[in-house]
Image: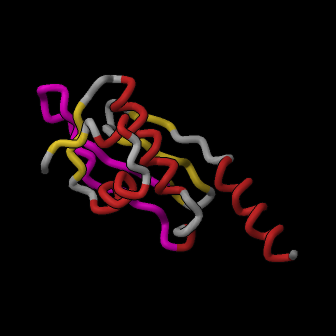
Amino acid sequence: MRQFFRRFSSYIAMSSYEVKHNVKGREFFIALDKGKAVLLYENEGHNTINMYHTQVPTELRGRGIAGQLAKAALDYAVNEDAKVKLTCTYLQKYVNDHPSPDYTSRVVAP
């Protein structure tokens, strides 16, 4: 039972992160107590976004933070009707683990 509450409280903490989008800096980020988690991208023209790097501080990995960044960035691509090039291996894994047609139909070869 104690383990259940730990997992549940981790889920609550995980779901409370706010993903922000810095358009000029070409990043999605979550401000954390110790730094920030980021997903970096480049606009490659022809309405294509290259999502090339995701980074979460080592001590905060495994809490779903990178997944929240991935979801926000991919949802942005859906809203912008953009194609995505996933050169970040984490994002490739995320799309494989979350094979929504909204995401998979936008992926172009790196």
Q: Is residue 94 magenta?
A: no
Q: Would residue 77 appear left or right of 35 to someone viewing this image?
A: left
The residue lying toward the viewer, choosing from 67 and 98, is: 98
- On the image, the x and y values in percent for residue 93 come to 35, 60
Q: Main secondary structure of the magenta part?
A: strand
Q: Is residue 88 left or right of residue 73?
A: left
Q: Does the magenta-highlighted stretch encompass residue 42?
A: yes
| First to last magenta residue range | 37-58
Q: Quadrant of residue 13?
A: bottom right
Q: Where's residue 79, x and y in %?
A: 39, 24
How many labels sit on residues? 0
Q: Quadrant of residue 43?
A: top left
Applied colour scheme: secondary structure
| Depicted 101 relative to depicted 96: above or below | above
Q: Nearer the viewer, residue 86 or 56?
A: 86
In this rendering, the answer to whether 78 lies above or below 7 is above
Quadrant for the N terminus, please.
bottom right
In the shown orientation, is residue 81 left or right of residue 32? left
Q: Position of residue 35 (x, y in %)?
A: 52, 58
The residue drawn where x is 65% and y is 55% is: 14
Q: Residue at x 12, y 26 (%)?
A: 46
Image height check: is 83 above or below 37? above
In this view, which residue lies farthest toward the top? 80
